[in-house]
Image (spheres, rainbow, N blue to C red):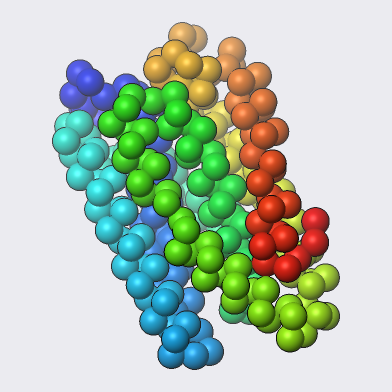
């Protein structure tokens, strides 16, 4: 992979990871739109899918500006992200919405924390891509309305949400460990792992992941679920 002199290795990993995540989100939201029970929901989800595609294109453009082949930057993250989605296959439309809200919320917190340690241009791009107000409001309101109508859903969906968090944190930690440049970026040295392994940065990675659950209870409450 070639890249320009201004592209930090950890930043390239961050952009590649986020680009593949956004591409996957586009396809999943498009699928959810097809399964939505009302025309209103179909339209809202289709609009969210279109936004994800635009975000993906922005990240792809940024990688090209840095002299990086976008597909090469994304490739290391295809297997781990696909594996997480395979292990957390929703069994219903509501489970799919909870997965979008919880799983991508945790992932978004991770991307933001990494971006805080990147250059200003990268930080601004990532923050723009991760703006999730429309999605969060739609998903939380839809799930909350469903559990108010059928309170028996609360237990099942709350259990599903807890499983999603555990799987997401486990997979995110595995990605950070396997990509020492990301671990190094988290340690604040610009994504240059001194020993090529990133092992010296794992304490910083562990502390960061421990803080990712802080907002989880807030997301559950917004959907009318329990921790």
Name the outermost residue toward the top: 194
The location of residue 162, given as percent across then percent down, is 75, 56
In the displayed structure, would residue 195 be above or below residue 57? above
Relative side of 1 to 83, left or right: left
Q: Residue at x 70, y 33 (%)?
A: 210
Total numbered labels placed on residues in the image:
0
Can the viewer see residue 56 in this picture?
yes
Assign the C terminus to one quadrant of the image.
bottom right
Q: Residue at x 64, y 39 (%)?
A: 212
Can the viewer see residue 27 in this picture?
no
Relative side of 77 to 142, left or right: left
Please tell me in which quadrant of the rendered image residue 28 appears: bottom left
Relative side of 27 to 212, left or right: left
Q: Residue at x 20, y 31 (%)?
A: 66
The location of residue 208, given as percent across then percent down, is 62, 29
Please tell me in which quadrant of the rendered image residue 174 appears: top right
Q: Residue at x 50, y 84 (%)?
A: 36
The location of residue 18, given as percent across then percent down, is 40, 45
Front-most of residues 151 and 180: 151
Relative side of 157 to 37, left or right: right
The location of residue 55, given as percent across then percent down, is 31, 54
Front-most of residues 19 and 45: 45
Front-most of residues 10 and 113: 113
Please tell me in which quadrant of the rendered image residue 27 appears: bottom left
Assign the N terminus to one quadrant of the image.
top left
């Amino acid at each position: 992979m070639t890249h320009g002199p201004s592209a930090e290795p950890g930043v390239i990993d961050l952009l590649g990871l986020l680009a593949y995540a956004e591409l996957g989100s586009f396809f999943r939201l498009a699928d959810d739109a097809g399964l939505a029970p009302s025309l209103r929901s179909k339209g809202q989800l289709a609009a969210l899918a279109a936004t994800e595609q635009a975000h993906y294109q922005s990240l792809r453009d940024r990688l090209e500006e840095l002299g990086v082949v976008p597909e090469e930057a994304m490739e290391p993250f295809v297997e781990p992200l696909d594996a997480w989605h395979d292990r957390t296959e929703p069994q219903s439309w509501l489970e799919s919405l909870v997965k979008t809200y919880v799983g991508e919320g945790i992932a978004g917190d991770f991307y933001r924390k990494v971006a805080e340690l990147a250059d200003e241009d990268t930080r601004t791009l990532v923050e723009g891509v991760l703006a999730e107000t429309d999605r969060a409001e739609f998903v939380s309101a839809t799930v909350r309305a469903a559990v108010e109508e059928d309170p028996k859903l609360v237990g099942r969906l709350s259990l599903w949400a807890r499983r999603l968090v555990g799987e997401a944190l486990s997979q995110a930690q595995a990605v950070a460990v396997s990509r020492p440049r990301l671990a190094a970026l988290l340690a604040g040295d610009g994504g240059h792992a001194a020993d090529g392994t990133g092992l010296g940065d794992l304490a910083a990675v562990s502390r960061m992941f421990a803080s990712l659950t802080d907002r989880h209870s807030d997301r559950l409450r917004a959907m009318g679920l329990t921790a």
